Image (spheres, rainbow, N blue to C red):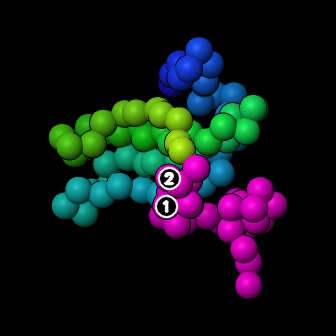
Amino acid sequence: MKVTDNGKRYNTDTCEDLGKYDHHNNGNYSGSTHLLRAKDGTYLEWTSTNGQDCYLRDNLCVVGDGEVAELVDSLRPDEEEEARLAELGLIEIV
C-alpha cells in the first residue's frame, strides 16, 4: 500500500515492520495494524483488513511523535521486534 504525506511517498513494501497487533470481531480475525519505519525514519501505521469488520478498513498514515508511544504499547512484539524497538529507543527493557 502507498500513501503520500507532505510530498513524500511511502510504500509498505519498502518500510521496516516493527511489530503488529491483530484485530478481532466477535472472535474472528479481521485484520492487523503494523507499526512501520520508513527509510527516512518516519513512523507509519498500516492497517490491513479482510472485510470481517465493517468498521475497520485498510489504511496507511504517518504517525506523530505522541501517537508512536501509544501504538508501541499496543504491539505484541516477538523477541527480535522487541530488541529493535529498544534499539530505536521506543521501549526500555527492564
Q: Majority secondary structure of the magenta segment?
A: helix
**How many other residues sit within 10 Å of disc 1, few (<14), some (14-19) or many (≥20)?**
few
Side of 41 relative to 30 (left or right): right
At a point 35% along the width and 55% down the height, the residue shown is 23
Residue 44 versus residue 75 in the image, above or below: above
At a point 49% along the width and 39% down the height, the residue shown is 46
For the residues labelled 1 and 2, say whether their Cβ atoms are less than 8 Å apart: yes
Observer-nearest residue: 77 or 73? Answer: 73
At a point 50% along the width and 52% down the height, the residue shown is 67
Q: How many marks?
A: 2
Side of 68 relative to 15 (left or right): left
Residue 93 spot, x, y in % from top left? 73, 78
Observer-nearest residue: 70 or 45? Answer: 70
Observer-nearest residue: 69 or 47? Answer: 69
Side of 89 relative to 23 (left or right): right
Q: Say if the magenta span includes residue 13.
A: no
Residue occupied by mark 1: 70
Kind of residue sitting beneath label 1: Glu
Quarter of the image where the C terminus is located: bottom right
Q: Secondary structure at mark 2?
A: helix
Kind of residue sitting beneath label 2: Glu
Q: Quadrant of residue 81?
A: bottom right
- Whether residue 80 is visible to the viewer of this picture, yes or no, is no
**How many other residues sit within 10 Å of disc 2, few (<14), some (14-19) or many (≥20)?**
few
Q: Secondary structure at mark 1?
A: helix
Mark number for residue 67?
A: 2
The outermost residue toward the right is 87
Residue 82 versus residue 66 in the image, above or below: below
Residue 82 spot, x, y in % from top left? 70, 66
Side of 16 relative to 50 (left or right): right
- Whether residue 86 is visible to the viewer of this picture, yes or no, is yes
- State which region is magenta: 65-94
